[in-house]
Image (cartoon, rainbow, N blue to C red):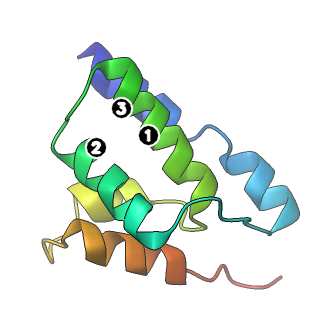
Amino acid sequence: MGGVVALSVARHLNRASWRRTGVVTMRYSEADLVRMVTKIVNTEGTEAEIDELVQTVNREVPHPEWMALAFHDDRGLTAEQVVKEALAYQPIAR
C-alpha cells in the first residue's frame, strides 16, 4: 500500500512548476520515456527507483494525468502510446 501512496504523491511533484511556466524542456528522448513508462507499469525496480522514474516522467511530459493513461485508460494503451499522447498534450490556453 505504501508504494501506491508514494506513486500518487510522486505524480504531483514538479507538476506545479510546469503549470507556472507552461514550458517543458525535454532532457530525454521519446524512446527513453517509453523505457521509463514500461518500467513503471511493470514495476521493474525498487519503490525508490520507480518513484524516481515517475518524477522524471512528470518533469518531461506536459500531460498532467499521464499515469491515468498508463493505468486507467479503457483503450489499454501501450507505453509507446502513453508517451506519444502525453507528449502531444496541449493545455487549454487561458
Q: Do the residues labelled 3 and 2 touch (CB within 8 Å)?
A: yes
Residue at the location (19% across, 73% down)? Answer: 77
Residue at the location (54% across, 40% down)? Answer: 55
Residue 53 is labelled as 1
Q: Which amino acid does the dot numbered 3 rest on?
A: Ile
Left or right: residue 4 versus residue 49 is left
List the residue tagged with mark 3: 50
Q: Which amino acid does the dot numbered 1 rest on?
A: Leu
Residue at the location (34% across, 63% down)? Answer: 34
- The quarter of the picture where residue 48 lies is top left
Q: Are marks 1 and 2 in contact (CB under 8 Å)?
A: yes
Residue positioned most to the top:
2
State the residue in front, 16 or 53: 53
Q: Can residue 37 be seen in this view?
A: yes
Please, is residue 25 above or below residue 51 in the view?
A: below
Please, is residue 4 above or below residue 54 in the view?
A: above
Q: Is residue 11 visible?
A: no
